């Protein structure tokens, strides 16, 4: 019989609904230990809950645009969590207990090295145990034990990674526990590693290229020359054909002949580079190899890379110094190797940078201070970072063109009012701010933000204690008439008078979240739904005056609006 064990600890994760400061409600750390919810199906504080779900965040004004080129079509993951178990096993089963809106798991991987060995020398490999499409729309809305068939691997593991796609989830997916079954082995020192094979050339690719012909005649072998039919095509046409290939296909094509090698290495194909889908294979050598092709690089994502020890900060710094002068977009989400040297390299070399994503990069505030040398930022994502008030203020002052700022779950900031006051004073075209769980943000801060940032189109101030009696929400809606998204999640004081102001002043509203209030009546909800013609999303979960029958009637009366109603047992 296979040995059973539950996750001993959470090693890394990309996002969570809960806060790092709190006691554990809705955090990734709830996945460590035995099940405490299953078989119940409910919204539960002891579950691991992802920060986002559905299409709503990607439809928001602050949503980053997709880096168009070089993404793997098979990569659909949006979030991940890595779990360490106590004992090495050859995996035979993985049992995932999904206790709310199941079906978001799309990939399961195993690592051949323990977390403490991942930064040491040696080949470290992540092996796919299972992958599949999101099942959010196919599976029943009830708790389930998800046990997909696993691929056999040749090494023992105690480090498992789950990846999620929640684009089709009807509400926040929640997990209770993860069980790993397998044949136990005795560990002898560090976990062994296996050879890594990155084959780029396949017979199928070569065959397709040899068969390709866009001519109507059959020239002689002498006319065809060394490169056959492909050699007859104009360079511009070959370049256009190559532009449709993803990175893996470009690598394969480059090894077929010198003609395609020249075209596949042309810098014009590498103005946008999305390396996130290849997070588990990108290493120092890979990044060094890209440098000669990236003289025109404008956008790059290295998000999730480096977590398995392949990529070092030194390699990233070298790459930025060589290829960062034209960068306008740099995404480094969940890159734990990022430290002060990386920030200094960005600040010194990426002087045209407009978008910077450092979410879940847990470097200290002092290391982030170098960002104040930048002056062209439009979008800055520091979700879960350790930035503090002085550093944040210096960054804002240096970037008057800043429009989008994410400070969700930034637990070190102890005076959010001071930060938003600086935004209002220096950023005249400011459009969106995420202050999710900004516990020190006050009603006075919201009033000042609304008065100084009248162009605001998006605001998330969920899980903050604000007093409606201060008039802060009425002031918000009265001054910020272009608002399209406002999340007032778990602000219990939101009332009918606040919804009246929203109705009166914000006709273009698209997304509203008032989860948890007991002071908003069904009548006001209907009036908002009737008059805000652009409204698509309305979360009224745990609203005291709206039971399941009222919500059912709202859904029937307004089928174009996705009304959300969560529940606990």
Image (cartoon, helix red, strand yellow):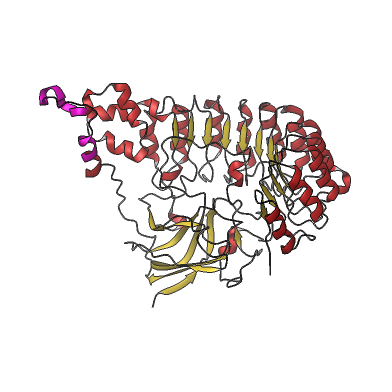
In the rendered view of the protein, which quadrant contains the C terminus? bottom right
Query: In the shown orientation, is residue 203 left or right of residue 98?
Result: left
Q: Residue 516's quadrant in the figure?
A: bottom right
Asked if residue 319 is among those painted magenta in the image, a careful observer would answer no
Looking at the image, which residue sits at the far right?
Answer: 469
Q: Which residues are magenta?
A: 207-229
Front one among 120 and 360: 360
Identity of the residue furthest to the front in this view: 557
Q: Is residue 212 magenta?
A: yes
Left or right: where 148 falls relative to 413: left
Q: Position of residue 339 (x, y in %)?
A: 54, 40
Instruction: Quadrant for the N terminus, please.
Output: bottom left
Pick the residue in front: 395 or 27. 27
Which SS does the magenta portion mostly show?
helix
Q: How many marks?
A: 0
Residue 59 image-quadrant placement: top right
Q: Position of residue 32 (x, y in %)?
A: 56, 65
Residue 363 in view, yes or no: no
Whether residue 439 is visible to the viewer of this picture, yes or no, is yes
Q: Nearer the viewer, residue 410 or 219?
A: 219
User: What is the quadrant of residue 457 in the picture?
Assistant: top right
Kindly identify the residue that appears in the image at 35 percent across and 36 percent down: 245
- The residue positioned 31% from the left and 24% from the top of the image is 237
Measured from the top left, where is residue 120 in percent x and y? 41, 50
Percent position (x, y) of residue 210?
Answer: 20, 35
């Amino acid at each position: 019989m296979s040995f059973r064990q539950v996750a001993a600890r959470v090693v890394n994760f990309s996002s969570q609904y809960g806060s790092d400061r709190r006691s554990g409600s809705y955090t990734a750390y709830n996945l460590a230990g035995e099940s405490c919810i299953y078989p119940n199906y409910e919204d539960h504080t002891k579950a691991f809950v992802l920060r986002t779900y559905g299409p709503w965040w990607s439809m928001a004004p602050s949503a980053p645009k997709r880096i168009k080129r070089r993404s793997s079509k098979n990569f659909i993951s949006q979030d991940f969590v890595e779990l360490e178990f106590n004992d090495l096993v050859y995996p035979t089963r993985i049992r995932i207990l999904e206790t709310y809106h199941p079906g978001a798991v799309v990939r399961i991987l195993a690592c051949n090295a323990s977390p403490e060995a991942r930064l040491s020398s040696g080949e470290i490999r992540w092996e796919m145990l299972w992958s599949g499409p999101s099942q959010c729309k196919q599976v029943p809305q009830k708790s389930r034990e998800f046990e997909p068939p696993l691929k056999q691997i040749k090494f023992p593991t105690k480090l498992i990674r789950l990846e999620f796609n929640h684009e089709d989830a009807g509400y926040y997916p929640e997990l209770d526990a993860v069980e790993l079954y397998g044949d136990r082995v005795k560990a002898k020192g560090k976990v062994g590693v296996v050879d890594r094979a990155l084959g780029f050339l396949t017979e199928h690719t070569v065959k397709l290229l040899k068969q390709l012909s866009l001519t109507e005649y059959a020239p002689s072998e002498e006319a065809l020359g060394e490169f056959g039919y492909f050699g007859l095509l104009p360079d511009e046409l070959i370049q256009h054909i190559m532009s449709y290939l993803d990175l893996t296909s470009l690598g394969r094509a480059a090894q077929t002949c010198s003609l395609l090698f020249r075209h596949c290495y042309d810098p014009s194909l590498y103005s946008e580079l999305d390396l996130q889908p290849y997070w588990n294979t990108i290493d120092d050598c890979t990044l060094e190899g890209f440098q000669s092709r990236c003289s025109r690089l404008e956008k790059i994502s290295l998000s999730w890379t480096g977590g398995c020890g392949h990529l070092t900060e030194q390699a990233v710094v070298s790459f930025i110094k060589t290829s960062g002068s034209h960068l306008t977009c740099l995404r480094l989400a969940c890159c734990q190797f990022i430290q002060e040297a990386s920030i200094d390299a960005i600040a010194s070399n990426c002087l045209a940078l407009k978008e910077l994503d450092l979410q879940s990069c847990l470097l200290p505030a002092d290391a982030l201070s170098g960002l104040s040398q930048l002056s062209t930022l439009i979008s800055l994502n520091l979700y879960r970072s350790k930035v503090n008030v002085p550093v944040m203020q210096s960054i804002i002052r240096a970037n008057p063109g800043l429009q989008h700022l994410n400070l969700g779950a930034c637990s070190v900031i102890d005076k959010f009012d001071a930060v938003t006051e600086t935004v209002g004073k220096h950023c005249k075209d400011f459009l969106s701010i995420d202050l999710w769980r900004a516990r020190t943000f006050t009603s006075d801060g919201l009033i000042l933000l609304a008065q100084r940032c009248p162009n605001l189109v998006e605001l998330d101030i969920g899980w903050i204690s604000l007093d409606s009696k201060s008039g802060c929400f009425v002031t918000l809606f009265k001054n910020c008439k272009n608002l399209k998204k406002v999340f007032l999640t778990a602000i219990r004081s939101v009332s009918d008078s606040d919804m009246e102001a929203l109705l009166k002043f914000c006709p273009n509203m698209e997304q509203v979240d008032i989860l948890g209030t007991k002071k908003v009546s069904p009548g006001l909800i209907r009036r908002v739904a009737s008059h805000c013609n652009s409204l698509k999303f309305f979360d009224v979960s745990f609203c005291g005056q709206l039971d399941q029958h009222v919500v059912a009637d709202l859904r029937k009366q307004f089928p174009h609006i996705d009304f959300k109603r969560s529940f606990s047992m």
